[in-house]
Amino acid sequence: MAAQEHPERERSQPERLSKDTVFSILSNQRRRYVLSVLHRNSETVELRDLAERIAAWENDVTVADLDYKQRKRVYTSLHQTHLPKLDEAGIVEYDRDRGTITLADRASELDVYLADVGDRGVPWPDLYLGLSATALLFLVATWLDVFPFSSLPDLAVAGVIVVLFAVVAVVNSYLVRRGRIGGGTSIDVLGDAD
């Protein structure tokens, strides 16, 4: 049943998802796959198509290479367990009668936990690692008197490094705080827990 069919549930839902609810929802890989598919599709997704795509990922095959059992196993668990749980939490709108699923507004509360870099850029740890490697190269070039570093005072090179780290840290802090759920710190929950 779609979330819009439960106006009393919408009124009784807390303003934000609790951390326990978030972790419970994201503890299952199939539910994370559901959210991934829905994030990639701005429109309504058919349950049959969703089940096929997830079954293909889980079995590391193309949709065309899936057998009946692989499709049915995923379809059944989505229909009976995972989609109702996501719908009840207000994360998706699941219409059982039509077999359609769309992201609900609350799904955005999970974005910080599902940071899928994909087309959006470089993961923060990789950015800091690259920045550290660059800073080390600057320091080595300064120590070896490599041009143009040989013409700069050591303090200027150190200042540039500190400013670069400060700018990246401020941007990172701003983005994390803007997307933070319940005031907690963001952690990686993209493991394979079921």
Image: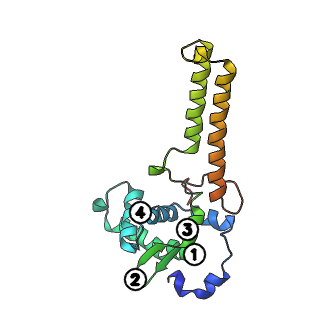
Q: Is residue 71 above or below residue 7?
A: above
Figure quadrant of residue 42: bottom left
Residue positioned 67% across, 19% down in the render:
154
- Are there few (<14), some (14-19), or many (20+) residues within 10 Å of tag 2? few
Q: Is residue 136 above or below residue 19?
A: above
Name the residue tied to disc 1: 90
Q: Earlier in the sequence, mark 4 or mark 1?
A: 4
| Mark nearer the viewer, 2 or 1 | 1
Figure quadrant of residue 160: top right
Name the residue tied to disc 3: 107
Name the residue tied to disc 4: 54
Name the residue tied to disc 2: 98
- Are there few (<14), some (14-19), or many (20+) residues within 10 Å of tag 4? many
Q: Position of residue 46 (x, y in %)?
A: 38, 74
Q: Assign a secondary structure to mark 3.
A: helix
Q: Earlier in the sequence, mark 1 or mark 3?
A: 1
Q: Position of residue 156 (x, y in %)?
A: 66, 23
Residue positioned 42% across, 85% down in the render:
97
